[in-house]
Each structure stands twice: as structure tokens, then as C-alpha cells.
Image (tube, coloured by chain):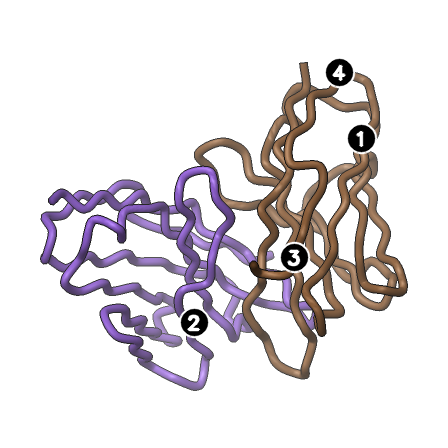
Amino acid sequence: ETGVTQSPTHLIKTRGQQVTLRCSSQSGHNTVSWYQQALGQGPQFIFQYYREEENGRGNFPPRFSGLQFPNYSSELNVNALELDDSALYLCASSSVTGGSGGYTFGSGTRLTVV
Amino acid sequence: GENVEQHPSTLSVQEGDSAVIKCTYSDSASNYFPWYKQELGKRPQLIIDIRSNVGEKKDQRIAVTLNKTAKHFSLHITETQPEDSAVYFCAATSGGYQKVTFGTGTKLQVIP
């Protein structure tokens, strides 16, 4: 058990709908990053949250938004879903200790947009 | 921003042989280079990492080398086993907020 949990594990939504994905970070980790992994591709950085604020963002439109809560858990919200949003969404937690460290990934949420 | 290129995209080796995966990065400020293994349907898992002040790191059958001047780093797996079969991703970390940029992945198949 890695300590990073994501919910739900699978989700099917219709184009145009909105979705919220959830992530609980590993104990002791204060930073949460979200990634989108399309089939056969590497994970693409969406954004990162640290101390409840967005701390960096990748090349994703504003309809991808997020939150981090005081207990360091996080949500990823996607509005106006498009078919291309179908992917595995990975949450990763890490600890900012003044140096770079490896992520601990959750098992992901597989989102299918139909 | 950072760009990480990885090759080969697929690699087949006989059990017991060595496998080498190579990556290049573009941002000279990148200072941390993790490698992840992702089995089918599972999460990426960190298998080894290297920091920019080190040229080589080894952990049992796995080793990573880094050439900062040339901006490339490599993963070496010796005495490969069928359970090494997976997709391997290299990555580079840049920016004060630890943004991790992944390569496109290498699908390694170890043939028994």
C-alpha cells in the first residue's frame, strides 16, 4: 500500500459533463501533482498544489482546475468534458524538503468520455 | 519548458541479457532524474533515481548514468528476468516546484 489513494477507480461520463476526481496524499507529503496519461503515452503534467495553492501548471486549458485541502488531499475538476479527455488520471504526492524527490503515485482514475 | 526524449520505444531482449534505455533532456536546470516502471494497468513506480551531482548510481541489477554536459541519462538493467517486462519511463525535474516531465516510455519485453 503506497498511501496515495484515488477515487473513483473508473468513471464514464458524457461529453459536455463535469467530473471531479479525488486524491488523498501519502502521510507526510504536502505536495500533490496531477497527471493525465493517455493510452500508450507518458504521463502529462496538469498542475501541482502546495499549501493549498496551485504551484505550477502544464499545458492544459482552464477547464482543468483543482483544489488542495488543509489535510493535503486534492481534487481535480474537469468541465465541459471532451472525448479526448478520456485517459488515466494519476495523482502523485511528494514532500518538498528543499530538494527534489520521487513521486508516489496513486492507482489512478480511468475516465472514459462518450 | 523541459522536453524529454526517450528511446527506443520498444525493446525485446532474451532473459539474462542486458537492456539499455536512453533519454535526453533540454533544460540545463533540471537536477533530478527518476525512472519509473509501469506494469500493465498499474501505477508508475519509482525504481531508481539520480541527482545532478552524481554521475552513476547502482541498485542491484539496475544502474543509471547521467551526463550533464551532453544532457543525457540512461537506464541499464542487467541479467533481465521476465518480471522486468513493463513500460519504463524516464523523467526530469526542473523548476522550484518539482515539475516532473516524463519521456514517452519504452516497452521492455523479456523473452524467457
Type of amino acid under label 1:
Val
| Eye-nearest disc, 2 or 1 | 1
Q: Which mark is residue B49?
A: 2
Left or right: A18, with B68 as reference point: right
Q: Residue at x 58, y 46 (%)?
A: A107
Q: Are marks 4 and 2 in contact (CB under 8 Å)?
A: no
Q: Chain of mark 4?
A: A
Query: A87 left or right of B107?
Result: right
Q: How many C-alpha atoms fall within 10 Å of the one at disc 2: few (<14), some, or many (≥20)?
A: many
Please provide percent x and percent y for residue A102: 54, 68
Picture colour for chain B:
purple
Chain at tag 1: A
Q: Which residue is mark 1?
A: A19
Say which residue label 3 marks: A4
Residue name at image x 69 percent, y 46 percent: A6
Chain A rendering hue: brown
In front: label 1 or label 4: 1
**In this image, A27 relative to B57: left or right?**
right
Same chain assignment for discs 3 and 1: yes
Q: Horizontal placement of A13 versus B10: left or right?
A: right
In space, the residues marked 2 and 1 are separated at their CA atoms by 34 Å
